[in-house]
């Protein structure tokens, strides 16, 4: 009898906010004995009213620590917004950011620790002592590197030739204030050149048994993490299979405005197009072009079953199955499918 494959013990996940966090809940249910390391996107981070806010780290931490608002998908359950209203009454901008009263406590702890000299990774570890997320959550970098979006000046300013003047605004302003409705000319991670991977990030990728890309935003979550120098290379180098779950179902993001982000980088909002954008990691097709992508495997939704051959022809193993994280069981099934695909792609010992 063949020996059963050894389980995937060490799993490393590159996660954004809501899509990443919900998937992680399923992953922990599907692989309760695994040691899961989460590399969190910090490109969304912002200073608001003197507070350091890390939306994606907090979404992962609150979701896995059972403190998330299930309805909104971000922020605390039972949240109130009194401080936000009071600040607005002072006329203090930005007034568009959803800063909740309970949430502010997290930002106060974080800001004080940062100001005392602790790196973000240490601060995150301290915050996780309260939330016990059941994963090792590491920011992609301890340095400040924030996503900005180049748009036509929202106030209508023009340049010398009378054309709309272009301006880079913070990702949060584009996403929250303008609902990603201002067409993006470019999306840039300001500070990427100086950002080093957070402590343990490269090791977690290199020593993993599987690297999983949850259905997070391919541009401003996963794309941002990969932009930190050394992280993409670690994903390309690791012996572990790298498997992704499509956040695009039936030509649309399941929630949020990932389509506006993909348009900004010239990628179609389509599960196969996202796989092509990530690219194959190893040349699975012998005659294929040299591979310099990051994927060995890709899961698409049943609605996108027709695109499976196109993904496979890129040299990426691909399967279709239901990918809507509608309830805990469905989510755990998606995670299990990602792990099974990864296990099937492990290099033979
Ligand atoms: P954010 O930082 O809060 O925007 O969250 P992420 O980057 O982690 O994830 C956002 C992505 O999750 C969006 O592009 C959604 O399409 C995707 N998403 C949300 N819910 C689901 C779901 O149930 N199934 C799949 N396949 N994708 C989902
Ligand atoms: Ca985010």
Image: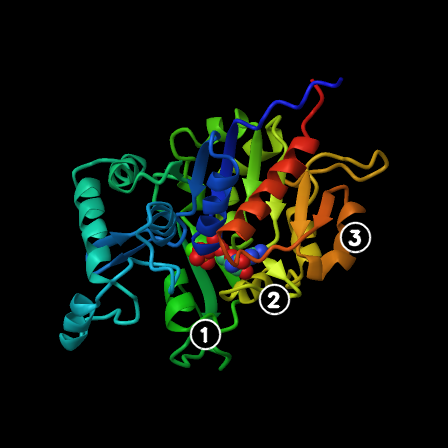
Q: Position of residue 78 (x, y in %)?
A: 25, 62
154 on left or right of 302: left
Q: Secondary structure at mark 3?
A: helix
The residue that mark 3 highlights is 310
Which quadrant holds residue 125?
top left
Label 1: few (<14), some or many (≥20) within 10 Å?
A: some
Q: Does residue 160 appear in this view? A: yes
Q: Does residue 230 appear in this view? A: no
Q: Is residue 210 above or below residue 45?
A: above
Q: Is residue 202 above or below residue 217?
A: above
Tell me the quadrant of the picture where the N terminus can be found. Answer: top right
Q: Position of residue 324 (x, y in %)?
A: 57, 58
Quadrant observed for ligand 2 in the rendered image: bottom left
Q: CA distance from mark 2 to mark 3?
A: 18 Å
Q: Is mark 2 within 8 Å of ligand 1?
A: yes
The residue that mark 2 highlights is 252
Q: CA distance from mark 2 to mark 1?
A: 30 Å
Residue occupying image coordinates x 55% and y 31%: 234
Q: Is residue 64 above or below residue 50?
A: above
Q: Is residue 163 above or below residue 280?
A: below
The residue that mark 1 highlights is 165
């Amino acid at each position: 009898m063949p020996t059963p494959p050894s389980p995937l013990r060490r799993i490393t996940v590159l996660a954004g906010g809501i899509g990443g966090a919900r998937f992680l809940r399923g992953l922990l249910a599907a692989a309760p004995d695994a040691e899961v390391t989460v590399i969190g996107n910090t490109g969304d981070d912002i200073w608001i009213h003197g507070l350091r806010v890390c939306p994606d780290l907090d979404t992962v931490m609150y979701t896995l620590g059972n403190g998330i608002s299930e309805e909104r998908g971000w922020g605390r359950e039972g949240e109130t917004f009194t401080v936000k209203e009071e600040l607005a009454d002072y006329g203090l901008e930005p007034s568009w950011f959803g800063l909740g009263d309970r949430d502010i406590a997290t930002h106060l702890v974080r800001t004080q620790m940062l100001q005392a000299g602790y790196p973000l990774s240490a601060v995150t570890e301290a915050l996780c002592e309260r939330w016990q997320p059941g994963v090792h959550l590491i920011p992609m970098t301890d340095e400040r590197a924030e996503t900005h979006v180049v748009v036509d000046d929202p106030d209508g300013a023009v340049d010398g030739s009378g054309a709309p003047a272009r301006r880079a605004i913070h990702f949060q302003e584009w996403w929250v204030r303008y609902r990603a409705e201002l067409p993006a000319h470019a999306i840039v991670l300001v500070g990427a050149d100086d950002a080093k991977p957070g402590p343990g990030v490269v090791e977690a990728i290199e020593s993993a048994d599987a690297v999983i890309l949850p259905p997070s935003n391919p541009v401003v979550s996963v794309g941002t993490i990969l932009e930190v120098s050394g992280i993409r290379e670690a994903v390309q180098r690791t012996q572990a299979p790298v498997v992704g779950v499509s956040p695009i179902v039936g030509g649309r993001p399941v929630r949020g405005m990932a389509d506006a982000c993909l348009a900004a980088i010239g990628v179609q909002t389509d599960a196969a197009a996202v796989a092509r954008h990530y690219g194959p990691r190893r040349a699975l097709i012998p005659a294929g072009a040299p591979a310099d992508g990051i994927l060995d495997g890709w899961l698409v939704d049943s609605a996108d079953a027709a695109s499976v051959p196109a993904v496979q022809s890129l040299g990426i193993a691909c399967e279709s199955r239901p990918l809507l994280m509608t309830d805990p069981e469905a989510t755990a099934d998606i995670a299990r499918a990602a792990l099974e695909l990864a296990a099937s792609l492990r290099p033979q010992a």
